Image (cartoon, rainbow, N blue to C red):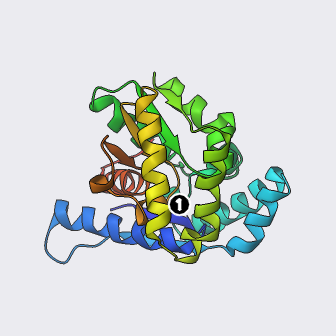
């Protein structure tokens, strides 16, 4: 089995499910006492979040690229960046390491295509919803992406940073997310991507009238499958 290098801590609330999902997938596949080979580097999210706010993406990319190199040096065979937003700097991480990075949008897009869908809504941080890096990746897979209007993007972003990343889950925020998901459905979304790794703390399939694609779970299960494969590119 290959060793998975997790770049986590952004936030740690959503890094915990990665460890659980990956090990559950390995146990389901291999049975018995099997578990995943994982090395985790958990960053201090305070500093990364400040770089996001300052639009200092190159510096954030350099820091995460350095983490990737450290994971590679410890024996990791593949990299998993446990956050949607920081995939904005995925190319910098890929360039710095000699092991592959499993991009979070790819297994998500594969699941959407397998479900026969072509138009989806996207919830995530303001950076993920408003900047092109995530939508463009989806469009490469033939998937059109809809995002909420500006006031609702503010709500989604605020709940992520001020509540979910701090372990807070409220019914009022869930109702706001449900309202926003319904609006995306009314605009033509066949499903909604939970495009921030914390959102599944708040919203599950029982809370929406359209299918939800949980990037955390899809990414983690894809990483486990990749680690159990006989080889990687």
Residue sitting at x 63%, y 46%: 153
Q: Indicate the position of residue 21 as horizontal and vertical percent values.
A: 33, 65
Residue 108 in the image: above or below residue 143: below
Residue 29 in the image: above or below residue 109: below
Q: Which of 94 and 159 is in front in this view?
A: 159
Q: Nearer the viewer, residue 106 or 173?
A: 173
Residue sitting at x 42%, y 52%: 219
Residue sitting at x 56%, y 36%: 147
SS assignment at label 1: loop
Residue sitting at x 65%, y 37%: 133
Residue of label 1: 82
Asked if one can make out residue 216 in the rendered structure from this viewpoint, the answer is yes
Residue 48: quadrant of the picture? bottom right
Q: Indicate the position of residue 78 as horizontal and vertical percent values.
A: 49, 56
Q: Indicate the position of residue 174 as horizontal and vertical percent values.
A: 44, 61
Q: Nearer the viewer, residue 203 or 7?
A: 203
Left or right of residue 200, residue 158 in this image: right
Q: Indicate the position of residue 39 as horizontal and vertical percent values.
A: 49, 72
Name the quadrant of the C terminus: top left
Q: How many numbered circles does the render carry? A: 1
Name the quadrant of the N terminus: bottom left
Could you classify mark 1 by the number of other residues whose Cα lies within 10 Å: few (under 14), some (14-19), or many (20 or more)? many
Residue 73: quadrant of the picture? bottom right
Left or right of residue 126, residue 109 in this image: left
Asked if one can make out residue 198 in the rendered structure from this viewpoint, the answer is no
Q: Which of 18 and 230 is in front in this view?
A: 18
């Amino acid at each position: 089995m290959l060793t998975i290098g997790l770049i986590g801590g952004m936030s740690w609330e959503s890094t915990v499910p990665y460890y659980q999902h990956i090990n559950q997938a390995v146990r389901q596949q291999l049975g018995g006492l099997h578990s995943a080979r994982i090395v985790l580097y958990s960053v201090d999210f305070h500093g990364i979040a400040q770089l996001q706010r300052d639009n200092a993406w190159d510096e954030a990319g350099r820091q995460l690229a350095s983490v990737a190199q450290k994971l590679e040096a410890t024996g990791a065979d593949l990299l998993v960046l446990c956050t949607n937003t920081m995939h904005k700097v995925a190319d910098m991480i890929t360039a710095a390491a000699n092991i592959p990075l499993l991009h979070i949008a790819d297994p998500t897009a594969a699941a959407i295509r397998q479900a026969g869908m072509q138009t989806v809504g996207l919830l995530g941080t303001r950076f993920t919803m408003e900047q092109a890096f995530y939508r463009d990746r989806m469009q490469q897979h033939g998937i059109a992406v809809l995002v909420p209007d500006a006031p609702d993007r503010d709500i989604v972003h605020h709940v992520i940073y001020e509540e979910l990343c701090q372990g807070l889950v409220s019914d009022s925020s869930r109702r706001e997310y449900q309202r926003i998901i319904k609006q995306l459905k009314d605009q033509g979304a066949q499903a909604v991507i939970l495009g921030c790794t914390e959102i599944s703390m708040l919203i599950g399939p029982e809370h929406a009238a359209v299918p939800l694609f949980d990037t955390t779970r899809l990414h983690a299960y894809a990483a486990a499958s990749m680690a159990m494969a006989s080889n990687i590119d």
